[in-house]
Image: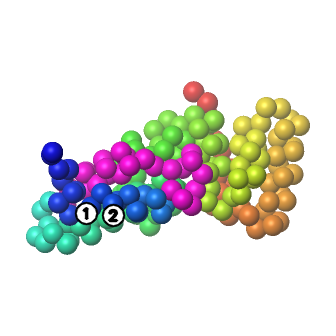
Amino acid sequence: MNMKPWEYYITRTDLESVLSEFNSSVGTSRQSSFDVIDEVASKAASEYAYLAEADQIQNAILWDVNSFLELATTGITASASEVAGKYLDLLPAGHPESVSPKLSEYASWVAGAPELFESDRDAVVASILPADEFEALHANVRLVEIAKQGRISKTTAGLITDSYIVEA
């Protein structure tokens, strides 16, 4: 069996654990698959192969994986431009940095925010992509109540008001 480049430095179980930790805190629209993380780790292993020590390569791979997952799940990371530049094609559909997201995908991604209750997600989608004026008004009233209860972050609220992506 052929080993992936990253498997010389990190176990599959370790990568699955990191992935599970990030995925467990967000809605399904923001989750990444193991195949995506496998690709991130493989690219990182190749990029950092020049490092002298195995533990340096391991740390670099884990840094890229964690940074990617942070960007993919929250939309924020300290090194967003660097991470997005390397792994732009691997971001979830609808992510603001992904390649040509559709408005419906964007709405689902925003609704997957970690702080939202499952019952709040449809209000987020309806506020970005309302079927009619009544649904938009109802969604916005619900969002005001959600905000009053502290169940939506400023980041997520900003993404709702910045829903500028055009349906393709």
**Which residue is at a point 60% across and 51% down the rendered structure image?**
27
Q: Up-down: is 55 above or below 86?
A: below
Q: Is residue 15 visible?
A: yes
How far, Cα to Cα, is label 1 from label 2?
Answer: 7 Å
* Local crowd size for mark 1, using a 10 Å CA cut-off: few (<14), some (14–19), many (≥20): some
Which type of secondary structure does the marked residue at label 2 adopt?
helix
Residue at the location (20% across, 71% down)? 56
Q: Is residue 162 left or right of residue 23?
A: right
Instruction: Assign the N terminus to one quadrant of the image.
Output: top left
The amino acid type, in three-letter code, at marker 2 is: Asp
| SS label for mark 1 | loop
Q: Can residue 161 be seen here?
A: no
Magenta portion: prevailing SS class = helix
Measured from the top left, where is residue 85 in percent x and y?
36, 50
Mark linked to residue 14:
2
Q: Does the magenta stretch include residue 107?
A: no
Q: Quadrant of residue 41?
A: bottom left
**Residue topped by disc 1:** 10
Question: Callout 1, which amino acid?
Answer: Ile
Please state the total of marks drawn on the protein image.
2
Q: Nearer the viewer, residue 116 or 47?
A: 116
Residue 30 spot, x, y in % from top left: 54, 50
**55 left or right, relative to 80:** left
Q: Position of residue 13 (x, y in %)?
A: 33, 60
Name the residue: 82% across, 41% down: 136
Residue 166 drawn above or below residue 156: above
Range drawn in magenta? 23-48
Does the residue at mark 1 contact the one at mark 2 (Cβ under 8 Å)?
A: yes
